[in-house]
Image (cartoon, grey):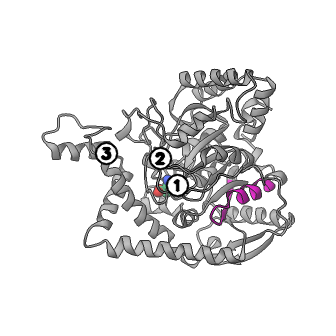
């Protein structure tokens, strides 16, 4: 097996056994990145990576370190990284060298991980196709004419294209799960509050949550062990102990009750995606699970609700980017107003501006009740639907995305793009954890299965995903071998 097809767990063993060093491993990935045309990275941090790899090797030589010591990864360019450009995919932050580390970046450093670079993404994490990046489109490793999904498209392409053993992602409305699904990898969005948002450039603060993007559920557990935890710098992070997420991977899932929301299998879902998802559910039945239909009646309102709440929050969050404190500033401003106006007009892309305008409008005095307040009420109803469903079932399953990866440039109007998020948004609105795991192919493009769990059920989700991955080999297939 080529070294780059190994999982984190396998690489870790190889490092400990001295089969290869972290320096060799890191160089191998850097070579792959530097000859790749996926455009998965905004910044490649070669020098830093080699330094970190050398430090990891020194630790391993002394018999010190942990299971992740010396493992390389791709870091979504939304996480602040001390001394390294942190652009969030935007021209606005093209010149921003972060003076501090996000908590997640800090934790990954503390675990002796090796950052290969900063992964490409939709500008400020707004998008479902990675076509909104100032740094260009990312290509899907399974077919380079297709989108990789978004907004963590660079992260997903890096893992699927074997440019990194794992990547970080963030998921505000599906941005870990949807690109994971379209690129055939494993992605986990934890419960809101599980991972610190400190230093993660804010899109919609009440929805944003970071998580791992990996080949396997086992690897996702290893990375979540490091990412998760209370942080006093993030007032929405939860004071709750971090479990060892690998501890229950091997538990039996006999007797598991799976809920299939009837609303997730209706109009708009591609037939082949539906049949792959149902085949995966059948596989679970053969492993001793039972299946029940459940209803999430308000999920029909997830798109309109999300596309009010998220723009409202982004219009507030992005107001700090005004050309004064940091970030892009227009040339020769006439006066202060001109400085604000042109810096923001020139620094932000189309989609970001659209959302700032929608958000500012929906929050304005005359419209606040009609839009923002209404959306918050609907959000509550969506959460209540899940509460009811989880009285009867242990996990909810369904598709991640209504279709497989579509052609680059083919979806032109924003509302059609928003429809791509139909199955992922509800979990964010409710704050629930969700996963995407590889569950088959349709015309040589990966199909993901979504798992949504109750609050704090990350261990259970990882257990379910791991058991599935013991029975199937969708997650081990690579574009290289298939292509
Ligand atoms: N596609 C959704 C959006 O454009 C979700 C993005 C995300 O999760 N960051 O907002």
Q: What residue is shown with label 2?
A: 198
Q: What residue lies at 54% left-to-right and 24% top-to-bottom?
A: 48
Q: What residue lies at 71% left-to-right and 51% top-to-bottom?
A: 245
Are discs 1 and 2 less than 8 Å apart at CB? yes
Q: Nearer the viewer, residue 84 or 305?
A: 84
Q: Nearer the viewer, residue 424 or 456?
A: 456
Q: What residue is shown with label 3?
A: 321
Residue 462 within the magenta-colored segment of the rendering: yes
The reply to whether residue 139 is in sight is no
Q: What residue lies at 54% left-to-right and 77% top-to-bottom?
A: 298
Residue 156 within the magenta-colored segment of the rendering: no
Between the residue at mark 1 and the residue at mark 2, the CA separation in whole angstroms equals 9 Å
Q: Is residue 239 left or right of residue 396?
A: left
Q: What residue lies at 38% left-to-right and 73% top-to-bottom?
A: 373
Q: What residue is shown with label 1?
A: 237
List x then y, in percent, for residue 238.
Answer: 55, 57
List x then y, in percent, for residue 64.
Answer: 72, 27
The reply to whether residue 208 is in sight is yes
Residue range highlighted in magenta: 447-468
- Answer above or below: position of 404 versus 162: below
Mark 3 vs mark 2: which is more N-terminal? 2
Mark 1 or mark 3, which is nearer to you? 1
């Amino acid at each position: 097996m080529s070294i780059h097809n190994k999982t984190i767990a396998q690489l870790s063993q190889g490092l400990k056994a001295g089969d290869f060093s972290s320096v060799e491993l890191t160089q191998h990935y850097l070579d792959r990145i530097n000859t790749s045309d996926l455009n998965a990275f905004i910044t490649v941090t070669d020098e830093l990576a080699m330094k970190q790899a050398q430090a990891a090797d020194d630790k391993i030589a002394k018999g010190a370190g942990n299971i992740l010591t010396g493992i390389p990864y791709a870091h979504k360019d939304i996480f602040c990284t001390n001394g390294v450009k942190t652009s969030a995919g935007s021209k606005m932050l093209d010149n921003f060298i972060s003076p501090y580390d996000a908590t997640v970046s800090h934790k990954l450093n503390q675990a002796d991980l090796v950052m290969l670079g900063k992964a490409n993404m939709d500008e400020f994490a707004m998008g479902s196709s990675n076509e909104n990046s100032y740094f260009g489109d990312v290509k899907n490793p399974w077919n380079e004419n297709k989108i990789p999904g978004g907004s963590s498209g660079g992260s997903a392409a890096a893992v699927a294209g074997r440019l990194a053993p794992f990547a970080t992602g963030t998921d505000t409305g599906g941005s870990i799960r949807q690109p994971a699904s379209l690129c055939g990898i494993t992605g986990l969005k934890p419960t809101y509050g599980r991972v610190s948002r400190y230093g993660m450039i804010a899109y919609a603060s009440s929805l944003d949550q970071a998580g791992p993007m990996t080949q396997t559920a086992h690897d996702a557990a290893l990375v979540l062990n490091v990412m998760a935890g209370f942080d006093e710098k993030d007032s929405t992070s939860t004071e709750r102990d971090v479990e060892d997420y690998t501890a229950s991977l091997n538990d039996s899932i006999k007797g598991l009750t799976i809920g299939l929301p009837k609303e997730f299998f209706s109009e708009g879902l591609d037939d082949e995606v539906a049949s792959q998802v149902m085949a995966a559910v059948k596989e679970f039945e053969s492993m001793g699970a039972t299946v029940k239909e459940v209803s999430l009646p308000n999920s029909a309102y997830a798109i309109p609700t999300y596309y009010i709440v998220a723009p409202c929050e982004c219009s507030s969050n992005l107001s700090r980017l005004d050309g004064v404190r940091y970030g892009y500033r227009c040339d020769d401003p006439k006066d202060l107003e001109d400085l604000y106006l042109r810096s923001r007009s020139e620094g932000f892309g189309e989609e970001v501006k659209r959302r700032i305008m929608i958000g500012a409008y929906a929050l304005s005095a005359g419209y606040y009740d009609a839009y923002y307040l209404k959306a918050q009420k609907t959000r509550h109803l969506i959460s209540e639907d899940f509460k009811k469903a989880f009285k009867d079932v242990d996990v909810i399953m369904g598709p991640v995305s209504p279709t497989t990866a579509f052609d680059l440039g083919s979806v032109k109007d924003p509302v059609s793009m928003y429809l791509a998020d139909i199955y992922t948004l509800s979990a964010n609105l409710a704050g629930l954890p969700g996963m995407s795991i590889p569950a088959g192919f349709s015309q040589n493009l990966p199909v993901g299965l979504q798992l949504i769990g109750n609050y704090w059920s990350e261990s259970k989700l990882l257990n379910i995903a791991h058991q599935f991955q013991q029975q199937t080999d969708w997650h081990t297939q690579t574009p290289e071998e298939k292509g």
